[in-house]
Amino acid sequence: MEITLLGTGSPIPDANRAGPSTLVRAGEAIVLADCGRAVVMRLMAAGVIPPMLSAVLVTHLHSDHLTDLNDVITTRWVMSPMPNPITVYGPQGTAEVVAGMMAMLAPDIRYRLAHHEDLNDPPAVTVVEVEQGDEFMIGDVTVKVAATDHRPVEPTVAFRLEHDGVSTVLGGDGVPCDTLEALCAGADAYVQTVLREDIVRTVPLQRFTDILDYHSSVEQAAQVATRAGVKTLVLTHYVPAIQPGQEDEWRALAAAHFAGEIVLGPDLTSVTVG
Ligand SMILES: [Zn+2]
Ligand SMILES: [Zn+2]
């Protein structure tokens, strides 16, 4: 199972880091989790065009995780020679958000349908809203869903992808909680969005320090990984962005609480587990 950090940024604009987005390749499936800023550019860099995606997972409805889903939908549509339906799995509220996106895209869809002789159907997007305990298949990959704690953002979910005895958990945003930890139990990889509490705390901006109460610190992510018996901890969505030369500092904070492999780095950092 191959995990690629397509975008390792956060809502804070960064010239080098795209918004939060992770790609998992397992068996025949190519699964996109979250669709942050510039996700389609990073998909291309990872060798994946949007028509190739098996499904899209959405951990929660914060804009930094969703802003370019409309680009995924449109680009898949215009690049597919035949109708190529896609399913978006996300928490309650996802249907409302996707319906809003489709409304936003309505003029574009009209123009292209009118202009292209061989394009006769609008993009086919199905939304499946999921919750704690749900389980479904994407091809031969089993996906399990757990509730996460990103309050006051509710509901929010994490996904566990399993294929051939190998598993990856996509934790999304949030602080540690029992349901997330249970989902992580024995996983080969656990991908968690993190912030540096020691740095964020020093910034004298209320709107910035507000984020401390609903995001995992590097240390908290490492502690969850240890308690759950995870093999590889993958950190992403760095707040603030890791500057060149700081990787070891971030890694050391996690390594103080977790003895397994720790993966972090620039956009397109990739790791194969299992
Ligand atoms: Zn986020
Ligand atoms: Zn969030």
Image (spheres, helix red, strand yellow):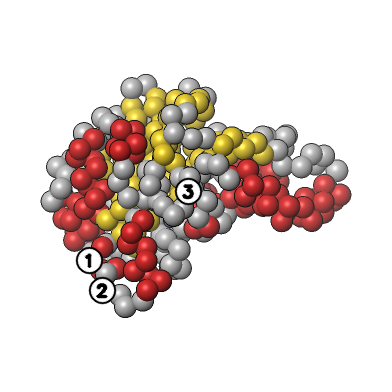
Crowding around mark 1 (Cα neighbors within 10 Å: few <14, some 14 to 19, many 20+) is few
Question: Residue at image x 31%, y 78%?
Answer: 204
Which one is in front, 233 or 114?
A: 233
Q: Secondary structure at mark 3?
A: loop
Gap in Å between the C-alphas at discs 3 and 1? 26 Å
Q: Position of residue 158 (x, y in %)?
A: 41, 40
Q: Position of residue 94 (x, y in %)?
A: 58, 44
Marks 1 and 3: in contact by CB < 8 Å? Answer: no
Gap in Å between the C-alphas at discs 1 and 2? 7 Å
The quarter of the image holding the N terminus is top left
- Disc 3 or disc 1, which is closer to the eye? 3
Which one is in front, 249 or 175?
A: 175
Q: What's under tag 2, amino acid-wise?
A: Thr
Question: Residue at image x 44%, y 41%?
Answer: 157
Q: Position of residue 95 (x, y in %)?
A: 63, 43
Q: What's under tag 1, amino acid-wise?
A: Asp
Disc 1 designates what residue?
198
Location of residue 84 with respect to 107 vertically, above or below? above
Q: What's under tag 3, amino acid-wise?
A: Glu
Location of residue 198 with respect to 191 vertically, above or below? below
In this rendering, would 253 be left or right of 62? left
From where the camera sits, is residue 235 visible? yes
Disc 2 designates what residue?
202
Point out the tag, 3 or 2, that comes first from the N-terminus: 3
Marks 2 and 3: in contact by CB < 8 Å? Answer: no
Disc 3 designates what residue?
154
In this rendering, would 70 be left or right of 150? right
Q: Secondary structure at mark 2?
A: loop
Q: Quadrant of residue 237?
A: bottom left
Question: Residue at image x 32%, y 62%?
Answer: 212
Q: Secondary structure at mark 1?
A: helix
